[in-house]
Amino acid sequence: MTQLDHQIHSIDPEVAGSRIFKFIAFLYGIAAYLVFFVTILYAIGFVTGLVVPKTIDIGPQAPTIEAVVIDLVLMSIFAVQHSVMARQQFKAWWTQFVPKPVERSTYVLLASLSLLLLFWQWRPLPAIIWNVENPDLAVILVTLSFAGWILVFTSTYLINHFELFGLHQVTNHLIGKETPPPRFKTPLLYNFVRHPIYLGFIIAFWAAPTMTAGHLLFAVVTTLYIFVGIALEEHDLVALFGDEYRQYKQRVSMLIPWRRSL
């Protein structure tokens, strides 16, 4: 037996299994992130009506009531998954079955799949609510919508984009590095509004030169969900950071810069 054979056979099977699991978990995290990345790019085209084959105003026609019910169910699936799985109580239960290093990646993957389901099964409501005919104003609104998406992406990078979407966790697990406990920080934009990511989504959804009934339904429901999500998220943040976050709430506006109430 060569020295190399001896080294291979002397590896503890549990250690080898652990290394294999770490690598599989890492690949799983990358796959989940790639699904998310494709989904968010499609979401931009879906809402703005550009590039992608199926948008918020394109798809199989259905009677108005049927279309509204289907669209509400699709948005509810995303909202329930997104909110319930983000709660600490659910995470404590969920990680009994899903390894903790891939918990965030699994959350991201399921959220992406629920959005893809929405894009696939969405029923358009083509009635025009408003249509901006002035080409300059229409360009301004489209630009503002894209600015909203840029605000979303920029804000995620300010608070650690790769941790938010699970890559940081699986990478740390792969190299055997402990993930540090969360610490409260308010980088750049977070000194003006507490939730710049949500603000970006609201701008992106509402800044439309042509607003159909289907787009309006989507914008209204997602905006209402954002306010519910903020309430749930801030409840968790107060539980996690205590007075530090309470003082932050008193100091910084929720969504509108320099205005405490919103």
Image (cartoon, rainbow, N blue to C red):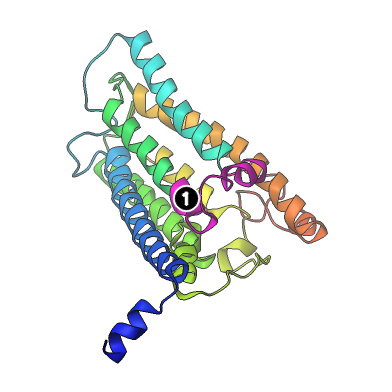
Give the image location of residue 134, x and y in percent: 27, 39
Q: Does the magenta stretch include residue 142?
A: no
Name the quarter where the N terminus is drawn. bottom left
Residue 54 in sight in this render = yes
Give the image location of residue 132, x and y in percent: 31, 34
| Front position in the image: 215 or 5 | 5
Give the image location of residue 213, x and y in percent: 36, 22
The magenta segment is 86-107
> Is 238 on the left or on the right of 255, as rendered?
right
Question: Which residue lies at the image location 62% right of the left edge and 42% below the top edge?
Answer: 93
| Front position in the image: 16 or 118 | 16
Q: What residue type is labelled 1?
A: Gly
- In the rendered image, the vertical position of residue 151 relative to residue 180, given as above or below: above
Question: Which residue lies at the image location 51% right of the left edge and 74% below the top edge?
Answer: 176
Where does label 1 land, which residue? 200
| SS of the residue under disc 1 | helix
